[in-house]
Image (spheres, rainbow, N blue to C red):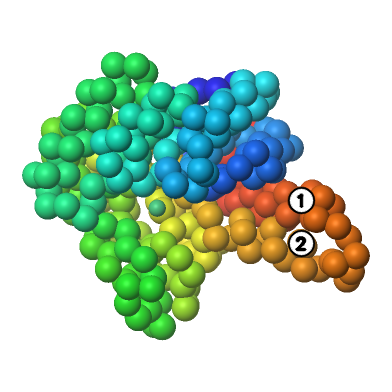
């Protein structure tokens, strides 16, 4: 069934688990992720960048059609929507939720732009995630020690509470030590900061940059108030590993490669469903 991520995350927040949010790009990755959710009886939030598929209207129809036929609850959230137009396209394409990422703008500008899109999204029952502080990219800076997170800026709890009140946003992505892209070491998460954010911010929290963060770190964060965990790179790694484990790739034929890639995606996501504690929560 197709549902907004907001209700799923509110339930997860009350019960102390997290919902995995795998990145999808096409029909194959959507089916592979939903297979994992059905095998584990877990809710799922599919995430997708605006430019990852060349036709958002077609992709929206594919995802919503597959999700509607599914037994477990599935949400589809635009990831890192960068402009007003991207948000409106996602709503028109049938996405249940949008992320309005203005985290690199000054606070007042972030508030103004998120607030405007919250008004539009809520008018048609679409949920909104925003980001305060900034989750950077690992290529922005050195992190050999595991201490650095590129261009990241940690979220300030009091500011986050004001931001939620001013914008009316449904969920908030926070910066507590993760970053996008591959890490050189294991990142050091700020669990004290996460505890403060969980106590101060009245909406469910989101963690970006889940891949490579380490199972122990993630499992702890999911129990402490992270209700949506974005995962991309580790799924791709799992898919490539499943493919390259085959001996005779050239003799296989391209059409036989898709099921192998999907299998790698599914198995990696099943692992993350266990880490998140969402198995059996559908
Ligand atoms: Zn992200």
Q: Residues within 10 Å of mark 1 (few under 14, many from 20)?
A: some
Whether label 2 lies within 8 Å of ligand 1 gets the answer no
Identified at 37% across, 34% down, the residue is 98
Q: Give the distance between the C-alpha atoms of the residues marked 2 and 1, in whole angstroms.
A: 10 Å
228 shown above or below 245: above
- On the rendered image, what quadrant is the N terminus found in? top right
Q: Is residue 11 visible?
A: no
- On the rendered image, what quadrant is the C terminus found in? top right
> Which callout, 2 or 1, points to the residue nearer the camera?
1
Give the residue number, with chain letter if any, for mark 2: 242
Q: Position of residue 203 (x, y in %)?
A: 30, 35
Horizontal side of residue 194 vs 75, given as left or right: left
Q: Secondary structure at mark 2?
A: helix
Specify the farthest residue to the left: 108
Identified at 76% across, 61% down, the residue is 242
Give the residue number, with chain letter if any, for mark 1: 258
């Amino acid at each position: 069934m197709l549902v907004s991520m907001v209700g799923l995350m509110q339930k997860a927040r009350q019960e102390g688990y997290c919902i995995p949010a795998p990145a999808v790009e096409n029909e194959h990755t959507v089916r592979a992720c939903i297979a994992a959710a059905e095998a584990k009886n877990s809710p799922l939030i599919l995430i997708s960048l605006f430019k990852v598929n060349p036709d958002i209207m077609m992709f929206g129809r594919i995802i919503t059609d597959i999700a509607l036929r599914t037994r477990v609850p599935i949400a589809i959230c635009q990831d890192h929507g960068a402009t007003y137009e991207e948000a409106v396209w996602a709503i028109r394409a049938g996405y249940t939720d949008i992320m309005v990422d203005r985290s690199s703008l000054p606070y007042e500008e972030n508030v103004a732009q998120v607030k405007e899109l919250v008004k539009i999204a809520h008018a048609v029952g679409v949920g909104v995630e925003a980001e305060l502080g900034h989750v950077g990219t690992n290529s922005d800076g050195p992190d050999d020690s595991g201490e650095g997170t590129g261009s990241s800026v940690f979220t300030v709890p009091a500011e986050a509470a004001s931001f939620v009140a001013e914008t009316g946003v449904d969920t908030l992505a926070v910066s507590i030590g993760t970053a996008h892209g591959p890490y050189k070491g294991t990142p050091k998460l700020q669990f004290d900061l996460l505890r403060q954010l969980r106590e101060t911010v009245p909406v469910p929290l989101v963690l970006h940059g889940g891949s490579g963060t380490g199972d122990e770190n993630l499992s702890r964060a999911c129990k402490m108030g992270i209700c949506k965990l974005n995962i991309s790179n580790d799924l791709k790694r799992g898919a490539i590993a499943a493919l390259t484990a085959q001996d005779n790739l050239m003799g296989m034929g391209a059409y036989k490669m898709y099921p192998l890639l999907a299998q790698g995606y599914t198995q990696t996501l099943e692992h993350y469903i266990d880490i998140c504690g969402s198995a059996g929560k559908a």
